[in-house]
Structure formats: structure tokens, C-alpha cells
Image (tube, helix red, strand yellow):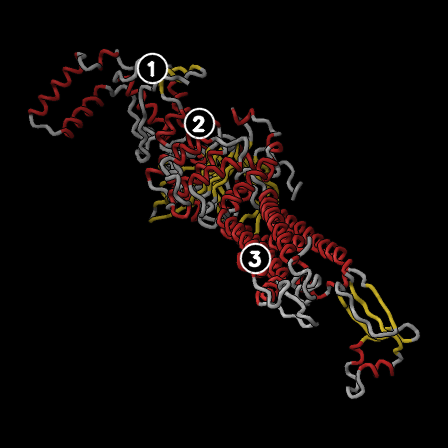
Amino acid sequence: MATESAAVEFRIDRRSGVATYLQIVQQTKQALRLGVLEPGDRLPTAREVVEATAINPNTVLKAYRELEREGLVEARRGLGTFVRRTLGGAPDATAADAPLRTELADWARRARAAGLEKDDVGALFTAVLDSTYSTNGTDPVGRSHKGDQKR
Amino acid sequence: MSTLTRPKTEAVATAPGTLRGSARVLLRVHRKALWAGAALLVTGIGIVVALRVWVASSEALCGGGDVTPCGDEIYVPNYAYTSAEGYLANGGTVLILLAALIGLFVAGPLIARELESGTFRPAWAQSVSPAHWLAARLAVPAALTVSGLTILVIVYRWGLWAFRSGPERYGTRWHSTGVFPGTGPSVLGYALLAVAVGALCAVLVRRTLLAMSLTALVFGAVAACLSAWRYELWPSSFRKSTDVLGHAPGDWPIDSGMLTASGEKLYWQDCFEADMTQGVEACMRDRGGIGYFSEYHPASHYWPLQLVETGILLALAALAVFAAFRVLRRLHG
Amino acid sequence: MTGVAIEAHGLGKTYGRRGGGHRALHDCSFRLPAGRVCALVGPNGAGKSTLLNLAAGLDRPGAGSLAVLGSTEPAAVRDRIAYVAQDKPLYPQLTVADTLWAGAELNPGRWDRATADRIAGTLPRTARVRTLSGGQRTRLALALALGKRPELMLLDEPMADLDPLARHELMGALMAETAEHGTTIVMSSHILTELEGACDYLLFVDGGRVRLGGEAEDIVDAHALLTGQARDLAPHTVVESRTTGRQLTALVRKEGPVDTAAWAVTQPSLEELLLAHLRSPDAPPLLTPSASAGVRAEGVSA
């Protein structure tokens, strides 16, 4: 068991309708994108996760297997599960002082000054996002059926 | 992992450990009862000691001791002497009642209440098997009661010793119903029987009050029967004479009457309904009685009688214990 | 960790007199693989407590056979089983500290004092058990159960008395135990949401037998909620169907691919699934392969 503490902790929302293991996968990826997790970081052990969240350990293991399958983490026997690589274009792209982020922050300030509510900005952003990334599969039906089951 | 490497034999190896653990837990759970038992023991000893001190310190009515023939056949006992003797004449009964009390405790709070309230579950769900659970509930009270009562029996005998030289009174003679069971091992037999019957009733009916009532009933019946037919437990001695027979001081007279020429026994009570104007003796003579006889237990029969009674009680207790384990096993495995 | 924790064949238990007694379990067969966290759900009086009692070796089955942790005599492995009864019976006159001490005394060579102390947490050690609240008693009972380091934990309605915070904390402790030691846990409840998320296995008991058994995920996957124009649902097994005008809503057990052109297909939640089965007592039972008791020896020890 590694002595250093884990780099993240997971929050499980039972009512979100998203399968618990997917929540862990998504939160790990989010942390990778935001640079909260970096290569070499240790993910919390299954024991640590379930003690804090009261979910089934197999759910955690399933999420870690999924992350491992995607090559994001690796399990080292007896030591724990460690981050192998980061996500997103580059870690710099999402860092607090990355150019894209400062531009977006700038744009958000202008939108606010123009009188847009937060929800309006969100809707606008999603619309633009959808049209920009529309080639990446639009499957409104099959969205999350696999993961909808409550476990 | 660690669960797999654990050797399977450990379950067997821990068995005596769980019995000891059960006993220790039992003692802690019933700590108050334990104190109450100790208090009873001390009270019993205290009463006997107090009576002896009282008798020893009381003033004799005519010089020369507590009770003295004042020059003729008339005894003038003092108040301390008669009172103490009166109390001690019931010592055996009190000890049997104490034994019954233990039985009631075993039947009620110790076993039936646990079965009734479900507190047996955490015990059995720990590593204690029902058999160990019951064994602890039999062994602990049995051991404590036997030791406590042994002390009380010794103290009681010491108490009676004070009256050995006095005039013979029926109340404190060795065979008196109120004395006999309290002066030897039979009271230990009563205690063990009470514990066993209590356990059996408890596992049978599993209701605190019902088990206690049933125990009282069964134990009371056994004690009453033994008390009524105690003289049958050992063959009595026989004595005949052409004169009316008296009894030696240590004798326990059972029955008497007259013998015919052919050796047939005529008991006095056979003639009780005879014509009273004639007298019983005349009636007996009419029936052919020529000599007198008497059946009795000499003082030397004390130990055989004690041991036979104890043996019967122990056998009954063993039977009850066996039945209790059988019942528990049939219900719970 | 590929053993079998509990395997039941034709299990039956009747309380009361032989003729007119209450039949708590009847011809109940299933298997629970080791290392799973199993929700034992069902309506009140379904036989959940009876099943746990039998598995804990506190009662003997009236019919059939039951093997626990590889032993056909559950009582013989009682030192490897922990059982917390529904009413959490404890000696009322003992203090919390005494109760934990008793746990150590009753489990020589097994007792894990640190774990028991950790679960007992903030319970006042000098308080007598009779003064504890329901939730505190549950905590103490769980401390006793976890302290003996069992391989199989049988918990009857463990969460019923707990406030949400304690429930979360103790459920977390149980999950940590199984994560670390591979402990098999069976938790009964008639409220599924209490156990969701924590359990990966399901035994749905109703009317004295197991109607659904297996991986929670597989059981859900085996069913589908179909909505469309009223028509024949064959070849699927209909658990429950409802017609409103021309529209038919049906919960079916899939037998082959579902015609997605004809039906709008969604996946039911586990709770919807259980409710549908409760409303349809005649729906056939479903046991996934891992939950099916082998064909071994019906009646060998009956």
C-alpha cells in the first residue's frame, strides 16, 4: 500500500442516472484534462474510494479497468493504480494561463458585459460546441443506455 | 487473502477458548446476580455464627451451661437456645430453597430470557456454538452453587454441633426433614438438579416466567417426593423383643408393631380403628400379636441415606442435562 | 476468490405446527458466489430473515440442504460467519466497552480490536447498551460483527435505524472490509434504494423462494421496457404489461433481439424491475448462471 495520499477523490451522485463506474471514469478524465491529475499520480485505492463513497468495490475496479483499457492508468501490483498519461490536447492547453483558456475567459467576460445570463452563455456554448464537433457522432438515443442501469 | 490462509483446524482449536470466553462473558453479564449470591452466602454464614454467639453468650437459667437438668428430669432451656434451635431446625429446608432459587435463576434470566429476547443470537453468531453456550450456562452456576453450598453445609453442621450435648429434640435430629438434606452432599445434588431442570425447562418453553414456574413445579415435586419417601432409600433395621421397645437417641423410628407367632408383622395403625375402649394393644393381641418389633434407621444409616439420595438427584440431573442438550441440538444444530 | 459463499437446494422452513404452520421458505434454491455484496430484497414476510437465520446456522432447515462457506453444516463454520439480526439483540445491562470486550472473549484468536473500535467510533464506552438509541445499537452490533473478521457477513436490515450520515459511514466501512478482505456480504432490506450502489448481486425473495438472483447488472440487462402499439410480445417473456388506448407498455424478459423498429426500448431500473415482479407474482423466476444452484444431489440430505 502506497504511503503517499491519493491525488483525487471521487464524488458519486446516486441520482444522476449515470452508472457509478462511468462517474468515476468521467471524473478521472476531467481531472486529467484539468491537470489535477498528472502522470505518476496515484489514484485512490478501491478501499479508500468505497470507504468514502459507500459504493461497491467492484464498481471502482471496473472503472479502473476501463481507464486502464484506454491506456490512461496502469495498475502496479501491490502499489496501486497510477496515471500514465494526461488527456486533452496538451496539459498546457487547459492550464490556468493557457492561451485558449485566457481567450475563453476574455470572451466570457464580454458575454457577461453584454448582459447574457450564465444559462444563456451555457446554451450558446453548447450549441457552438455541438455544431463544431458534430462529426464526432450524434447519437441522441444510444447516449447512455448501457450505463443507465443502477448498480 | 488473509481469509484464505487461515487454517481450517482453527475452529476446533478455539473450542475450549470459546467456552472459557462464554463463561467470562456470562459472569460479567450477570454481575449483579453474582453479588446477590455472594451476599446470600455471607448472610447464611452470618446467621449461623450469630446464632452460636447468641447461644454461647446467653445466660444459663440454672448454673452449669445453657441447658441444664436442674436437679431432675426437667430441662429449663433459655430463650436463646430454643430460638437458635428452632431456626437451625429449618436449615436444610432453607438450603434446598437456595438450590431452587439457583434453578429458577438458570431457567429464567440465564437461559429462557436470552431465548425470549434474542440475545442468544449475538452469542451464537459470534464463535460460540449453542452447545457451548448452554454448557457455560450450566457449568458456571453449577460450579458456583456447589462451592457456595458446600461452605454453607459445613457452616450449618458447625451450627448444629452446638446442640449435640443438649436434650434430644425432634427438630434438630439428624433425620428431621428440615435438617437432613442440609447436612450432607444431598443438598449439592438438589442444587445440580435445580440447575439442570432449570436449563431443560428453559430450552423447552423458551419463556422466562413459564420456564421458572415449570422449574419450581418439577423441582418442588422431586424434593417433596424424596422428603416423603426418604426412609425407603436404604433398608431399615429391624429389632424385636417381648417387651415394648424404646429407641436409642440416634434412631430414626420408621414403624413398629407386634409380631405374631408365625412372624407376621402387625402394624399399630392396623388397629387404630379398633374399638377404642379395648385399646390398640388388645386389638393386636386379638390378632395374634405376641412380641414387639420396630423398624428404624440407626444413626449409622445417615451416610447411606445421604449418598443414595444424592445419587438419585445426580442421575435425574444428568438426565435433564442430556435432554436439554438434545432439545437445543434438535432445534438449532 | 472463486468459491461459493452460500448454496441452497430446495430449502424449506416452516414455523409452527407441521400441518398448518407458516411456510417461510419453500423449495428455495440459489447460489451466492464468494466475494460479492448481495442485496437480499423482498417484501415483508418474504422469508429474508428466515434465510439469514438458516445461513447463520441458528436454525435448521426443515427441508433441502444448505452449504455455507463450503460446509453443509453452517453451524460448523460459525466462527467464520458474522450475523446481525434485525432487532440487533445485545445484552442490555453491559456497557459498550463490556460488549466489545465480550466480542474479544467470544472470538479467541480471531478478534480484530482495532476494527471493532473503529466501527464503534464515537459511541460512549461507559454507556449501557439499554441506554443506546437504535442507530447506536446498530453501530455496536456491526462493530461486533466486523470485529470477528468474518468471511461471510449476514446483515438483516442493517441500515434501518441509521441516520443518513451514519448509514453512509457504516456502508463505507462495510465496503472497505470487502474491498480489503474479499468478505462476502448479504444485506437484507425491503427498501432497495438503501442498498443500491453498494450491492453488485441480487437475491429477490418473494413468497418463500428466490424469484430473481444473480449479478444486478445481468438481471437488469435481461429485461427491457417496451412501449409501442399494442401487439403480440412473443417471443419475449412478459413480466408485466399495461395497455392505455392503443399504446402498450410492457416489461419483458428478452428472449432474443428486440424489434427496435416496432418498440421504443428503454432499460428499466432495478427498482422498476422489482416492483413489476411484485405486481406479477406469476412471472417465472430468473436465476443467472452464477446464481443457479448446481444440479448436485437434490434430496441427499433432505
Looking at the rendered structure, the kind of residue marked 1 is Asp
The residue at which mark 1 appears reads as A41
Q: Tell me: residue C169, above or below residue B6.
A: below
Left or right, A52 with respect to C219, comes to: left
Q: Position of residue B154 (x, y in %)?
A: 64, 52
Q: Nearer the viewer, residue C143 or B177?
A: B177
Q: Which residue is mark 3?
A: B53
Q: Chain ID for label 2?
A: C
Where residue C40 sits in the image (x, y, percent)?
46, 41
Q: Is residue A70 left or right of residue B170?
A: left
Give the SS element for disc 1.
loop
The residue closer to the viewer here, B66 or A109, is B66
Q: Could you say where residue C111 lies in the image, as x and y percent from the top left?
A: 50, 32
Q: CA distance from mark 3 to mark 2?
A: 72 Å
- Mark 2–mark 1 CB contact (< 8 Å): no
For the question of whether residue B103 can be seen, the reply is: yes
Amino acid type indicated by mark 2:
Ala
**Mark 1 or mark 3, whichever is nearer to me:** 3
Of badges 3 and 2, nearer the viewer stands 3
Which chain contains the residue that carries disc 1?
Answer: A
Q: Amino acid at mark 3?
A: Val
Label 2, label 1: how far apart the Cα atoms are? 21 Å
Residue found at x 47% / y 35% = C185
